[in-house]
Amino acid sequence: MAETKKQTYKKAGKTIKILGIGLNSTSISEVLRKIEKRIRDNQKTFIVTPNPEFLVFGQQNPWFKEILNSADISLPDGVGLVWAGRILGRPLKGRVTGADLTVGLLELAVKNRWQVGVVGARRGMVEERRRQVEILRQKYPGLKILALEDTPGWQKERLEIVFACQGMGEQEKWIVKHLPTSGSLVFLGAGGSLDFLSGFARRAPLVIRLIGFEWFWRLIHQPCRWRRQLALLKFVWLVLTEKFFGI
């Protein structure tokens, strides 16, 4: 039954494959409507937001590629994926970033009085993690939010949305482990999205995001990310290889 529902969503949203990984060609408004409906219908939903680094990691680690392709909703978070879609003749409607989706889901949670869980935020540091949850409660008055590490027996709670923030790979493994056995509905691999909302990190100005240079903004503000940016070069090579030789 779950598999049938997943296929129905992906047909409705149109699935584009890049480097063997399916991505939904959709918009932020469309995907928020879909998620809200799935919550009202009590459907469990696994959401991933791949960027080029995810796709490169997936080529190197088949287990991760399999997890990404098992998601109910897979959203292209990265201008590089939009570029790749055009190059390969499989255009995507556009980016749907994890940061924008997180904001939209929190607003829906406040409006609908949903309960939200957060796990793995703020580099695993207990005090920073708790501070982040408090900031989110202040920013979204009325938000019902639980820090799952501090909530014994959270698996028995009915949480409409769970944000897993352990970072690429770890958060998706955690979701695959806990989604089937918990009472919660929507699980999103959110990465550092909550950091932008809580002020622990600065997001690029809108104009930088619109021209597709958010990755460069983050590199300037976090020079330690330079090794991760090498994955972009690998991604370009893989896309061109698929374009001209197939993979």
Image (cartoon, rainbow, N blue to C red):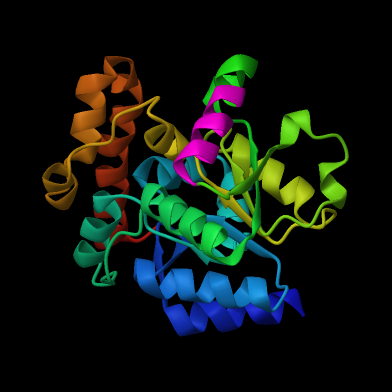
Q: Nearer the viewer, residue 11 or 234?
A: 11
Q: Nearer the viewer, residue 11 or 32?
A: 32
Residue 80, horizontal then vertical, whole percent: 25, 50
Q: Is residue 233 left or right of residue 98?
A: left
* Tag count: 0
Is residue 6 shown left or right of residue 210? right
Q: Is residue 137 magenta?
A: yes
Q: Main secondary structure of the magenta part?
A: helix
Q: Start and end of the magenta stretch? A: 130-140
Question: Looking at the figure, which quarter contains the N terminus?
Answer: bottom right
Locate residue 79, reporting x and y percent: 24, 52
- Side of 74 where 212 appears, left or right: left
Residue 70 rendering spot, x and y as whole percentages: 63, 61
Is 89 placed above or below 154 here? below
- Residue 89 in the image, given as x and y percentages of width and height: 23, 72
- Which picture quadrant has residue 36? bottom right
Residue 168 seen anywhere in this rendered image of the structure = no
Seen at 78% across and 57% down, the residue is: 158
Residue placed most toward the observer, 227 or 171: 171
Q: Residue at x 52, y 75 (%)?
A: 34
Determine whether 54 is above or below 86 in the image.
Answer: above
Give above or below for 28 relative to 184: below
Is residue 239 a member of the stretch shown in magenta? no
Residue placed at 70% from the left, 62% from the top?
A: 185
State the image quarter where residue 197 is shown: top left
Question: In the figure, 223 relative to 169: above or below?
Answer: above
| Residue 201 in view | yes
Give the position of the C terminus as an image quadrant.
bottom left
